[in-house]
Image: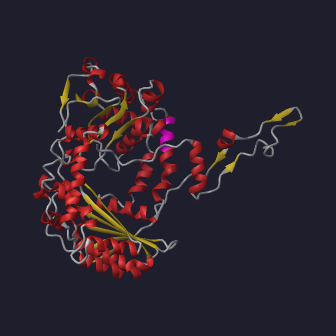
Amino acid sequence: MIVPRRSLLPRRSLLGAVLLLTGCGGAPPSIDTSTPVPPVGEGSRPSGDTVVPPSIGRAAVEALAFEPLDFEQPAVATRSVRGVDVLVLEDHALPLVTVYAYFRGGYGLFDRAHYAAAMGLPALLRYGGTESLSPEQVDEILDFHALQFSFGTAGGSVTTSVNTLSEHLETAFDLWGDVLANPAFAEREIATWRARQAESVHRRMDEPGLLAFSEFNRLLYGDHPIGWEMDENDLAPERLTPEQFLTVHRRIVCRENLILGLTGGVAWRDAEPLVARLVDRVPPCPGDLPEPPIPEIRRGGGVFLIERELDQAVIVMAHPTSVRLADDDEYYAAMIGNAILGAGGFSSRLVGRVRTEEGYAYSAASLWTTPSRYDGIVGATTRTRPENVVPAIEAILETMGELREAPPSADEVDTTVEGIVNGFVFNFDTPGQIVSRTMYYMQQDLPDDWLERYWEGVRRVTPDGVLEVFREHLRLDEMTILVVGDPARIGRDALATLGPVVVLDPR
């Protein structure tokens, strides 16, 4: 199902202290020395009539103090080569270079007849050979020069990268450019990919979690790319010809759709000619891509059941919400509220109620998706024994409703915000992570200082702000609830107490 990008989970003060000591590079901690601390191993010593306890364990950790963290986004240089933006962050610590390419365009921008070809495009670029090299020859060059390719896709983009030793950078650019610009889409590789997908289609019904999420997306989003799931019609041979792949390739892998990123042990003056040669090989786009379609998300609630004889039932529930990805206090409050509710791991309210208090499940999680152009969804998911399905759903709904009735405590908000702020260093583990994240924000038309704005935005969130966003956007009576499980053990009458039950028969 559609799940928001995973945010950093709240960390308790002990973990925050350890992270700051080992990874943030900030000011050293100061220790409260007002209480004498005996040498390690000597225990308490009398001082007159007073016994001074050793400052160890929790007390020692809580005595640590730190300078406030200041966020400064690492600088990424933006170059332009033949009209293509190139984001550059040099890092000469190791003789390694990674080059990234982000192409706007994916299966979500084409009709259903091109769905399979657009989904398979990244795999066939990697394994389908080129006009001058067979698939085996491509693999031989990769192995000989220790090059690493990656390819992927989402509904609105195709991404790829190449990692290489600095001394092999020219070879890497030449091979990568050949794969991108001159793919052969070998028929035997298409057949191999088609066979793997057909096997996945047949096995999807055997995995309850995948079945639940795919059918829930179909239920909410209908005939929209978010709700699409690969089926046998998509894999018909006439929809997976080399010509079909070439049609999709020409629309996506073209110059106006491209953003490049470069990081590692190479100076820009040395890399620029190679980048220019690559850009020259990528042809101009034959026309503009259509805008992503706006989904009409199902509203009105309801209870749906997929009958399966399972020892663990899967529960998924959600309804639409109009909170959008934006530099807006409502957005930040929704993200903090979602972490408090169920996206914050074992410290969240849903886990506390469903797991710790009731013992219904090992875990439970909330979700709040926030696309920038259309509505998202807010909801929750868990797995539990069939006999506990209805009590677990009622506990989840009750826990969600509590955030409509009263604000979270200041400690809950502070802990969640602290976790995000203290964990912000993990957004910048590597130069490659920084560059690829910046490329994504550029492609999504987010401001260059988006991370800085997010940092400041979450720090402004208050308990009343969380209460307000839940009161405005959480509507429990409109929740669409899907259960995959054994109706005999769940109890049809018990499930019907939540509303009229519709039995689904997924294909």
**Rendered view: 35 above or below 126:** above
**Which quarter of the rendered picture does the C terminus lie within?**
top left
Magenta span contains residue 186 = no
| Left or right placement of residue 343 versus residue 255 in this view | right
| Left or right placement of residue 186 versus residue 314 in this view | left
Residue that protrudes farthest toward the left in the picture:
238
User: Residue 10: x and y, percent?
Assistant: 49, 43
Residue at screen point 21% across, 38% down: 220
Magenta span contains residue 413 = yes
Prevailing SS of the magenta stretch: helix
Residue 119 in sight: no
**Rendered view: 432 above or below 175:** above
Residue that protrudes farthest toward the right in the picture:
48
Residue at screen point 29% across, 71% down: 136
Q: Quadrant of residue 14?
A: top right
Magenta stretch, residue numbers: 411-417
Residue at screen point 30% across, 74% down: 137
Q: How is the image coloured?
A: secondary structure
Nearest to the observer: residue 501 or residue 465: 501
User: Residue 77: x and y, percent?
Assistant: 40, 71
User: Residue 213: x and y, percent?
Assistant: 28, 40
